[in-house]
Amino acid sequence: MNWGTRSTCVLHVGNGIDVYTQPCDRHSVVGIPHFFDTVGVFNPSVYANNTINSGSVYSSLGPIYVQVPVSGYSVICRDSCVNNIGPPYTPTYSFDMNFILLFSINVDKPTNASYIIDYGDGTVTMATDMPEDYFSYSWNNYRVFDFNHTYTRGNNYTVKVIIWNLVSNVTYEVKHDLFEVIKDLDFTVTEIDPVTGNYKAGGGPDQNYFALEHEIRFLASHTRGTHVTYTWVYGDDDIYSVYFDKESLHFYTDDFTFTVDLIATNKLSSRNISKTIHIQRGCWNISLSVDDPRSKNTSFDYQFDLGAIGTNACYYVDFVDKTSVPSQYLMFGDTTQCSQVPEWSHEWTNPNRNFFELDSAAWRISHENDTSKNITIRNMFMWQGVYPVRIQCKNKVSHTMYNYTTRVTKGPCWWPYVNLTRPNKCFSPMCDENNVKTHYRSNKLIIYSDVVINCTATNISIYTWSVFKVNENTGNETELSSSSLGNADLQSIGARLLIIESTYLEYGLYRFSLNVSMNELMGMYTIDTVYIRIIPTPLVVQISGGSMQKKKWGTPLSVDGITMTYDPDIDQSDKTGLTFIWLCRRLCESWPEFDADFNIIAPMEENCTYTPAFANDRGCSKVDNFDSSG
């Protein structure tokens, strides 16, 4: 109740019999436990009265439903729970399965119960009220009703009868098996991509070539047949047998041709099928390198690392330079594989093709204990330039490629040596938490470079600087133009140093990049970068008139702290944002200590005979019974 004291509450549970009387008021909740021993729908109410007035109310939650919960049922097969379906056991693939729902004679029937039946093959009946009349079945069970269902496929089925009312929900189950003869046994073979986890079909015209380095997936299939045990004979002395699961995963340890047998059995039949698969090593981890740059008309001895040494692989090299000697293209590897690659046929059918045979198995055996599987490929470029040399490796299970940018000069020339890190190293205290050099915004910034040129093909090297502002939240960078840097020299033959005048760079992190390139030699360049953080310069704080002033006792003292105080990172006349905190102390006192927000964390300490005029006077407001100088 919201209001009322010294009341009497009379609670009616709604059955017309039981009444409870208790004192009650607005300060406490009154409740009573009650056990209903009769099924029904009850409307509880309460009547309250005191010396002033009375009132009554029914339950705001509605009536109380009292029901007998669901229990005591069971489901059985009327005949056998194990049967066969399909020829020669039944004329067609159709089987009528009969069931009985039983109820224990020792349990009360549930109140207003309903049920559905799930036959386990996707068929579910509509909700139906439980019948009122049960029939005699055995000494301890009633027969509620019989039901049946026609199945068209064999399987291990679970039939569920789900019975419920307002106070309970119970599922009763029976399992039964329908066996089928195995028909049309087959299996597919795929490999699992270790990067994506996707299934991939095999290579070759029959899609039966698979990579040694990948896990192989076998998947059985059949149009008919249940309760099957699958036995996989992989052909490498490994056998795997499993019930029900059609999938099998296997790793092979050698590149070879294997015959895989699948034997499928159940209590009615046994079938087997065989397939041939080819396991090859993939063309993984190939690489190409050469001692460059070198002059034109000289031999480039490329070192080619065969990596995993792909089984029966064909290798195709494009040197790009059409005037290369002996040819722009080079093919080597397995003759059969090289002759079957359509996109390389233009070179294979060339009567003057540049080709040599390489037996992958023999090469692997002969270099089994070598850390490097390199072979040397020789080529001579006739023209200077930058050539994106590409080597490709292809067999039935892989196709990989590797690019190496080769620089060919008109004379002896080596890469420029460029280093920005060493000459711009940070030294304490001008380092941030990541050991990046810091620099005050008010100071001129000079980025030093350590550059060594060793090239006789040209006398000119060009220095190109780039400056990027780094967004430290996203990692994105914004390149700055020369005009935003005070027209700093960003590109010239003499820009070994990058000089940026003071205050052009805002606070934050910057990346500075230097590209040193050799004139007239395309692609002959080296790039290095360094990070520098621009930070606020400490404020300049000065009191006009010097650090010592003398005044006659009793005359006004004017102290000017704004004229000569300024922020070096902006114009000296701009005093915007400056906050002045004045303090005064006598010689017998020490200054207080402040935190980063200039809150006092340690008060003045003193060894004086003076008495403070008030609690926090910031010094100098002292009395000692007479006016005195100090």
Image: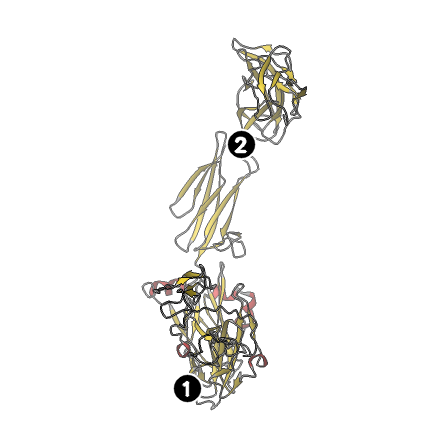
Quadrant, the C terminus: bottom left
Residue 53, image x and y in percent? Answer: 68, 19
Residue named by callout 1: 454
Residue 545, image x and y in percent? Answer: 47, 81
Query: Along the line of sight, which residue is nearer the eye, 390 or 75?
Result: 75
The residue drawn where x is 49% and y is 64% is: 400
Examine the image and state in which quarter residue 87 appears. Answer: top right
Examine the image and state in which quarter residue 425 appears. Answer: bottom left
Residue type of the residue flagged with mark 2: Val
Residue 77, image x and y in percent? Answer: 55, 20
Q: CA distance from mark 1 to mark 2?
A: 82 Å
Residue named by callout 2: 181
Query: Along the line of sight, which residue is nearer the eye, 570 or 39?
Result: 570
Residue type of the residue flagged with mark 1: Asn
The residue drawn where x is 52% and y is 25% is: 175
The answer to whether one can see residue 331 in this image is: yes
Quadrant, the N terminus: top right
Label 2: few (<14), some or many (≥20) within 10 Å? many
Residue occupying the far left of the picture:
369
